[in-house]
């Protein structure tokens, strides 16, 4: 399966060699192997993290110009995931996504993206000066979230924009829903342009047959993954994978070097190195355990009155080709409380912290770090909450249909950099938005910088407020005012 020896951890080994040499440090960081660290912090952390918190020198290599153990560690990551090249991103997946965008589009180029992208995608578009062409993802009104974009939507958008330079999709979504990425890849490649994938929530795909197909398996040209989210790397650690047929690998490395710090954390990079080894060697069995526990949780939660946890029954719906069972979305609208309410109850009363909450749902992210004891604690807590709230007749209403995507009058970079002034939202019709406006659920922007504010949007926001739904994005937390381009 692998061409390289995946039991190797070249960067971690180099750091261990540095430690075992008992090297006297006259280099940064100034804590000098922990000698200068605050004592209370060191007592909590232990001494070992500080011993490998080093800077660039030959033994441990350089992230920006790798020739030794970092180069080898990245080659091992590429081998494990089936890419032509892999890069460590200690700037998170946000930095990797911005790198992907800036590697494939320049100022004035069109890039096709879903409307519900992460803000790092918009940041990449602002930095590049590209022109976004939006696709509407499929909406699920039962649970109030967006799923993937369909292959038909991608094909129609490309037909209308044959001059687009790239297509970006999210796969899987935060909630674990995967689209038909293989078909989308084929469609995009028929235009001889690259498909780039925000695979932040899929660093574990490809290592167990009971999970959706990964971006690299589907033939995508680039993908970025939050290695820290699922498979054991430390927070801030991500991987960027590249195929060379339509992508200039050297360009990718140059852009990544522009965005990343010149003082990367070797502690973080070592955790990436070791997380890759773990998933490559033991991923199948570890993920099987995670899937079994998550499936057990889903079954038990679906037997709790007032709660619903979607599963395989939604496969085949528009924008849903497969599911990552380790993502556990718990819909609580039949309890008559919001996802935010349930999130706070679990946190404050039961000391259980969920990954996210929206108006109707909370999300639990399963991984091979879970235990049955912890899963049972969640289930027992949800049963108690159900007994307290179910049957009061306060079921939350359906969310309102989102207005059409407005006309883009300025590219996002120009709107972002322009002089802006706040006006009352009700007086802003016909003006150009200088900021975002989003409704939860389903988390899709109603307005993006550079777009024309319409009467439908203003009325929609008022309807959301009247219904008690959550609106955010503007500097004004009450969303009475919006900043517009002068």
Image (cartoon, helix red, strand yellow):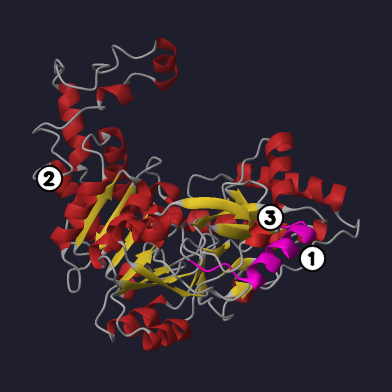
Vertical arrangement, residue 45 with respect to residue 99, above or below:
above
Looking at the rendered structure, the number of numbered marks drawn on it comes to 3
Badge 1 is on which residue? 397
Name the residue that disc number 3 marks: 470
The quarter of the picture where residue 457 lies is: bottom right
The magenta segment: 451-470
Identify which residue is drawn at 40% across, 87% down: 160
Q: Main secondary structure of the magenta part?
A: helix
Q: Earlier in the sequence, mark 1 or mark 3?
A: 1
Q: Which residue is mark 2?
A: 66
Q: Along the polypeptide, which appears first: circle 3 or circle 2? A: 2
Residue located 57% across and 81% down the image: 316
Q: Is residue 458 magenta?
A: yes
> Badge 3: how crowded within 10 Å, few (<14), some, or many (20+)?
some
Left or right, 114 with respect to 221, comes to: right
Rendering coords of residue 416 (x, y %): 42, 55
| Mark whose residue sits in front, 1 or 3 | 3
Label 1: how many Cα within 10 Å (few below 14, some 14–19, many 20+): some
Front position in the image: 298 or 93: 93
| Label 2 SS | loop
The label shown at residue 427 is none
């Amino acid at each position: 399966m692998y061409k390289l020896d995946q039991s190797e951890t070249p960067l971690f080994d180099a750091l261990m060699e540095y430690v075992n040499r008992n090297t006297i440090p006259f280099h940064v960081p100034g804590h000098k192997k922990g000698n200068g660290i605050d004592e209370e912090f060191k007592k909590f952390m232990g001494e070992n993290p500080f011993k490998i918190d080093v800077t660039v020198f030959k033994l441990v290599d350089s992230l920006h110009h790798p020739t030794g153990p970092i180069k080898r560690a990245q080659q091992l990551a590429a081998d494990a995931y089936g890419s032509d090249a892999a890069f460590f991103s200690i700037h998170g997946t946000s930095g990797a996504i911005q790198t992907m965008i800036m590697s494939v589009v320049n100022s004035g180029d069109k890039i096709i993206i879903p409307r519900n992208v992460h803000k790092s995608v918009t940041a990449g578009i602002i930095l590049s000066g590209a022109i976004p062409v939006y696709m509407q993802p499929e909406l699920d009104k039962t649970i109030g979230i967006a799923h993937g974009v369909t292959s038909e939507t991608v094909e129609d958008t490309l037909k209308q924009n044959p001059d687009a330079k790239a297509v970006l999709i999210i796969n899987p979504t935060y909630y674990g829903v995967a689209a038909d990425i293989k078909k989308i890849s084929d469609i995009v490649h028929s235009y001889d342009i690259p498909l780039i994938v925000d695979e932040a929530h899929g660093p574990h795909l490809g290592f167990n047959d009971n999970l959706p197909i990964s971006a690299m398996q589907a033939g995508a040209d680039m993908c970025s993954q939050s290695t820290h989210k699922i498979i054991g790397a430390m927070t801030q650690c991500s991987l960027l994978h590249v195929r060379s047929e339509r992508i200039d690998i050297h360009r990718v490395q140059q852009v990544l070097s522009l965005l990343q710090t010149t003082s990367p954390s070797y502690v973080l990079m070592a955790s990436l190195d070791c997380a890759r080894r773990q998933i490559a060697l033991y991923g199948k069995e570890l993920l099987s355990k995670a899937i079994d526990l998550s499936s057990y949780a889903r079954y038990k939660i679906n037997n709790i009155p007032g709660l619903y946890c979607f599963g395989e029954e939604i496969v085949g719906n528009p924008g849903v080709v497969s599911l990552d069972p380790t993502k556990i979305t718990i819909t609580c609208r039949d309890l008559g409380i919001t996802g935010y309410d349930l999130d706070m109850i679990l946190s404050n009363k039961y000391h259980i912290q969920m990954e996210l909450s929206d108006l109707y749902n909370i999300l639990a992210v399963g991984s091979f770090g879970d235990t049955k004891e912890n899963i049972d604690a969640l289930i027992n807590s949800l049963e108690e909450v159900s007994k307290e709230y179910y049957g009061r007749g306060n079921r939350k209403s359906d969310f309102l249909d989102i207005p059409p995507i407005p006309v883009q009058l300025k590219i996002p970079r120009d709107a972002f950099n322009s002089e802006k002034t706040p006006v009352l939202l009700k007086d802003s019709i016909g003006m150009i938005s200088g900021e975002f406006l989003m409704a939860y659920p389903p988390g899709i922007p109603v307005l993006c910088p550079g777009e024309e504010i319409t009467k439908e949007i203003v009325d929609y926001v008022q309807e959301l407020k009247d219904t008690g739904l959550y609106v955010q994005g503007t500097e004004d937390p009450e969303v009475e005012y919006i900043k517009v381009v002068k």
